[in-house]
């Protein structure tokens, strides 16, 4: 069976490196096997979800090349959620509860004081129709909890049942969750809004999701959701929970994710394939290397390669990977983008400077060096003036430098750094950069002579 997977962000903010890692893992699983990648917008939070954020998510995914075959919005499926909820109510699996947050908090504190786990005591199950009518007459509206299976037969509804939910996780191996130690989860709020734990299961069942790949912070949640799948009589997808990311300092990224958004990476000039390569390979047994096409990543993809240890994300490593990717790009790969930057130097210019750019926009600095006036830095005026006298006539090519510098060395007696460092400073105004044998023909004789004589050129 070809896999059907989903990436399910909430349109309450922009995508960041943490959730884009989840997206790429799902995408590669589908891509490798010719399956289906669904974008599902979890937008039932009416106060925080916006169309602007939804469009931002689409923009980020398109920039990265993660094309989805189908888009779904939970806000379009509210009637379906109501329909399924009514089925669960009729089966006795959803039950009404009327406690306020303050009352629930007091209950939890009393249980903790008695040395008991602070889980819901199922008062709602004991309410009669008359009790419910009185509470609603007071202006209370129910929230609805899902009755988890457990070994408490006291209510007489289900009798003894196993409390352990288990599955073979495709990343973490055998997993178990003791749902008997959990509170019955609220699936429907007082205002009728369905919660993620519920809507996600309904969607996954209806859309035929075969694999759920998400962060390890959902492991306990998965135990509850597997119980909901069972209550619905639906076959649950295979589960894979990847580790979360930490920063280079070993601390969680959560407080800094705003600076690690895909929007920020794009504005910094990072290459989509650098971001994808880093996100796909981080925390796996594969080396983190730049890949030119997403199919190369798909060919490498294997859930079994993903470590259960936290992935260590360092923005400096991402920028380094970006540089390595650009250093491998041919002129044809970047020609249109260079022209958009106003760079018309052709293949010779790109071949000369590509090893010295971290982002493509860095090429503009070197284009300025070879085509515009700069202030030369004169470290040894006698030597650079003598070098100006020895400049050969044009035309120049890469062999010009290897003929010119021995002549300067012979005339001045200088070698090594004493020879080459003053020439670089005079010709580029920089301490380091591309090989001068490649830059010299681009700078041209007129500018070269002016700069060697300490003039703007």
Image (cartoon, grey):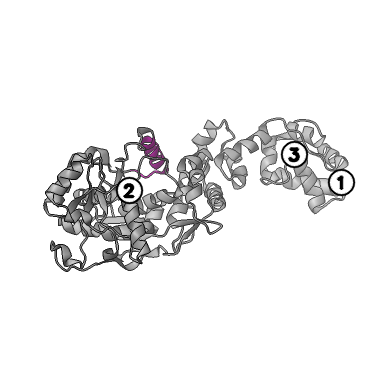
The image shows residue 18 at horizontal and vertical percentages of 43, 51
- Compared to residue 210, the image places residue 194 above or below, namely above
The image shows residue 189 at horizontal and vertical percentages of 26, 44
Give, as a single range, the part of the protein colored magenta: 53-67
Inspect the magenta stretch and tell me whether residue 63 lies in it.
yes
- Number of the label disc, if any, that sits on residue 427: 3
Q: Is residue 374 left or right of residue 186?
A: right
Q: Is residue 388 left or right of residue 106?
A: right
Which secondary structure lies at badge 1?
A: helix
Magenta portion: prevailing SS class? helix
CA distance for labels 3 and 2 = 72 Å
The earlier-in-sequence mark between 1 and 2 is: 2
Q: Compare residues 310 and 85 and report the one nearer the observer.
A: 85
Residue drawn 68% across the image and 38% down it: 441
The earlier-in-sequence mark between 1 and 3 is: 1
Residue drawn 14% across the image and 50% down it: 89
């Amino acid at each position: 069976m070809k896999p059907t997977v989903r990436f399910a962000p909430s349109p309450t903010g922009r995508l960041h490196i943490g959730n884009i890692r989840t997206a790429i893992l799902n995408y590669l699983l589908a891509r490798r096997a010719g399956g289906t990648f669904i974008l599902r917008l979890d937008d039932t939070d009416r106060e925080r979800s916006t169309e602007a954020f939804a469009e931002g998510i689409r923009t980020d995914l398109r920039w990265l090349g993660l094309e989805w075959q189908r888009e779904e919005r939970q806000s379009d499926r509210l009637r379906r959620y109501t329909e399924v909820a009514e089925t669960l109510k009729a089966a006795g699996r959803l039950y009404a509860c009327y406690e306020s947050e303050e009352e629930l908090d007091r209950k939890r504190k009393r249980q903790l004081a008695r040395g008991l786990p602070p889980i819901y005591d199922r008062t709602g199950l004991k309410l009669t129709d008359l009790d419910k009518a009185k509470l609603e007459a007071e202006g209370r509206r129910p929230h609805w909890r899902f009755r988890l299976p457990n070994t408490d037969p006291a209510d007489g509804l289900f009798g003894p049942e196993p409390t352990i939910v288990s599955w073979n996780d495709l990343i973490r191996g055998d997993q178990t969750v003791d749902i008997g130690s959990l509170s019955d989860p609220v699936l429907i709020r007082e205002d009728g809004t369905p919660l993620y734990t519920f809507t996600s299961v309904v969607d996954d069942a209806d859309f035929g999701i075969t694999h759920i790949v998400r962060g390890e912070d959902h492991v306990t949640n998965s135990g509850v959701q597997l119980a909901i799948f069972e209550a619905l009589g639906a076959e649950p997808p295979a589960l894979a929970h990847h580790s979360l990311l930490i920063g280079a300092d070993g601390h969680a990224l959560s407080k800094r994710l705003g600076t690690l958004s895909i929007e920020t990476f794009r504005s910094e000039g990072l290459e989509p394939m650098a971001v994808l390569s880093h996100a796909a390979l981080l925390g796996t047994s594969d080396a983190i290397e730049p890949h030119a096409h997403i199919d190369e990543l798909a060919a490498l993809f294997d859930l079994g390669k993903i470590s259960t240890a936290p992935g260590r994300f360092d923005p400096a490593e991402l920028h380094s990977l970006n540089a390595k990717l650009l250093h491998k790009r041919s002129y044809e790969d970047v020609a249109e983008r260079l022209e958009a930057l106003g760079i018309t130097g052709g293949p010779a210019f790109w071949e000369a400077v590509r090893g010295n750019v971290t982002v493509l926009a860095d090429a503009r600095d070197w284009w300025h060096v070879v085509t515009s006036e700069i202030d030369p830095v004169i470290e040894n005026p006698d030597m650079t003036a003598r070098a100006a006298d020895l400049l050969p006539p044009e035309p120049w090519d890469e062999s010009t430098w290897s003929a010119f510098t021995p002549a300067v060395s012979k005339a001045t007696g200088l070698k090594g750094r004493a020879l080459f460092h003053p020439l670089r400073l005079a010709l580029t105004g920089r301490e380091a950069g591309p090989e001068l044998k490649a830059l010299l023909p681009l700078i041209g004789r007129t500018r070269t002579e002016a700069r060697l004589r300490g003039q703007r050129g």
